[in-house]
Amino acid sequence: MRHNRVFVSGCYDMLHSGHVAFFRQASLYGDLYVGIGSDATIYELKGRKTIYSEQERLYMVKSIRYVTDACINEGSGMMDFITSVDHFRPNIFVVNEDGSSTEKEAFCKERGIEYVVLKRVPDNGMTARSTTNLRTTQSGLPTRLDLAGTWIDQPYVSCLHPGWAITISLEPTFDIKERCGMSTSTRNVIKQIWPYELPDYDPAMLAKLCFCFENDPSRREAGHHISGAQDSIGICMPGLCRHYYNGSFWPERIESHNNEQNLRWLEDHIVLTLTFPRPDNTNVVTGNNITEEGVARLAQAADDCWEAILHCDYEAFYKAFAASFKAQTTMFPAMLNEEVNACIDKYRSEARAWKLAGAGGGGMLALVVDDARSFAQAHPEAIRIKIRRKGN
């Protein structure tokens, strides 16, 4: 069968095992020739620049052992491969089932080329991959966990008493569910700019850029909620971070702490567990009881939490962690409901303290435990955290 000349075409910007499996399957029909979408065509079709230049993609595709030869398609649009077909003169044109189209099939019929549609089947032991899947589920963007001072990043809270919010930036080592309190809305906005990883910018400047992009006044309708700055700061600033709010949306000061001993200590004492996604109609601001005294307690708990972490004082840490959550839920009682309380009750006898990530009403529950490793062994649903280090 090796006398056949087989042609495939695609972008191959994020080369992955699914592409290799597709090349292997297509090469079973004959000598395989690949047409690669140009940088200009990908920008035209997808509205974004490529991750790898066309010359890099050509180099990588040609290096795959199933490929006989490859070229950059000279055309444009979805049918950019016509001149490549004229060059390689294949008698078989192979596509994946999600890449099939009536235009391609009609083109092959007109040229007398056999049109073959393959199902997307991973090789043995491999996970099914597609570029869309990688973009939506395999992003390397970090997330954040708010440790203390949650809500003080809203001006209507900090105007009564200034204070710090404390966050840690987390590696995405677990499945980050939508509406779980792990700043997924902010993370999804950032994905529109940088789908896979944060650029190598100054973290504080990057956080402000992301905050401004998410809260662009030109895209906000009247009454639109402005996302707290702790989300973008918690995502973009590596390690342990605290940010000081005093009646404004953006903090007056940001302090970052990346001492390895402190970061490992936090990883040894915090686990996450999913309660349930926060319902779409949840409004935790309803029935709030925001007072100067209450905000002062929230601010004091954050101060105590910070000092406890810096000194690796476990007892002081879990007491401050609990005090911060109590201050939150006193001001915003709608953060708690029967389902959340039932989840807390499940771990009450084993965890030292707990709090909901983000605004509450459901989502991720953070637990302070004596030993994260042993707790996770006893509770398979528990997630151990990995704090993002400076430089990662």
Image (tube, helix red, strand yellow):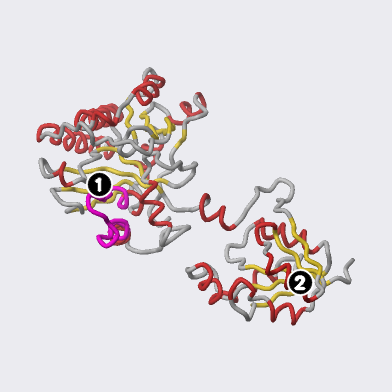
Give the magenta-colored segment's residue range: 210-233
Answer with left or right where residue 326 lies relative to residue 98.
left
- Distance from Cα at disc 2 to Cα at disc 1: 61 Å
Residue that appears at 64% across and 74% down: 79
Residue 291: give x, y in percent of width and height. 11, 34
Residue that appears at 60% across and 76% down: 55
Q: Nearer the viewer, residue 282 or 226?
A: 282
Residue type at numbered disc 2: Cys
Residue 329: give x, y in percent of width and height. 24, 29
Residue 129: give x, y in percent of width and height. 63, 53
Residue 87: mark = none
Answer with left or right where residue 232 lies relative to residue 53.
left
Q: Is residue 38 above or below residue 292?
A: below
Q: Secondary structure at mark 1?
A: strand
Q: Secondary structure at mark 2?
A: helix
Q: Is residue 105 above or below residue 390?
A: below
Q: Is residue 392 above or below residue 270?
A: below
Q: Classify residue 354 by image quadrant.
A: top left
Residue 316: give x, y in percent of width and height. 25, 29
Label 2 vs label 1, nearer the camera = 2
Residue that appears at 56% across and 56% down: 132
Residue at mark 2:
108
Residue at mark 1:
242
Residue type at numbered disc 1: Arg
Q: Earlier in the sequence, mark 2 or mark 1?
A: 2
Given contact means CB atoms under 8 Å apart, are the residues at marks 2 and 1 in contact? no
Is 216 included in the stretch rendered in magenta?
yes
Dot 2 crowding, Cα within 10 Å, few <14, some 14–19, many 20+: some
Q: Is the C terminus in the top left, top right, bottom left or bottom right quadrant?
A: bottom left
